[in-house]
Image (cartoon, helix red, strand yellow):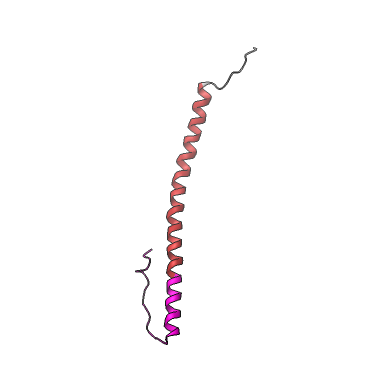
């Protein structure tokens, strides 16, 4: 059987498209989860920075007052 292959047949193309579709359905939800996780980590880091700066300001000015919670800065 000498058959010259000029390209892909339709079945092969459908299989490739199906495999790509499966990969996309797995990858997209994971990538959206990374975005929200990153935003939360940035928020926590910002809160720690503000808490440290506020504590330093209170110590510098010899104040004993402190804020109970910094949830207003970044409610995670």
Q: Residue at x 38, y 66 (%)?
A: 74
Residue positioned most to the top: 1
Which quadrant does the C terminus fall into?
bottom left
Quarter residue 50 falls in = bottom left
* 35 vs 47: above or below: above
Position of residue 9 measured from the top left corner of the image (x, y, whole percent): 53, 21
Position of residue 58 measured from the top left corner of the image (x, y, whole percent): 42, 82
Residue numbers of the magenta segment: 48-76
Q: Residue at x 45, y 44 (%)?
A: 28
* 31 vs 15: above or below: below
Q: Residue at x 53, y 25 (%)?
A: 12
Position of residue 44 measured from the top left corner of the image (x, y, whole percent): 44, 65
Q: Residue at x 57, y 21 (%)?
A: 7
**Residue 76 as seen in the image, left or right of residue 13:** left
Q: Nearer the viewer, residue 71 or 25?
A: 71
Position of residue 35 measured from the top left corner of the image (x, y, whole percent): 44, 53
Q: Is residue 59 magenta?
A: yes
């Amino acid at each position: 059987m000498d058959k010259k292959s000029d390209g892909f047949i339709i079945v092969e193309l459908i299989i490739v498209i199906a495999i790509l579709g499966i990969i996309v359905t797995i990858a997209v939800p994971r990538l959206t989860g990374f975005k929200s996780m990153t935003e939360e980590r940035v928020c926590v880091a910002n809160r720690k920075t503000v808490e440290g700066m506020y504590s330093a300001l209170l110590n510098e000015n010899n104040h004993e007052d402190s804020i109970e919670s910094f949830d207003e800065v970044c409610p995670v």
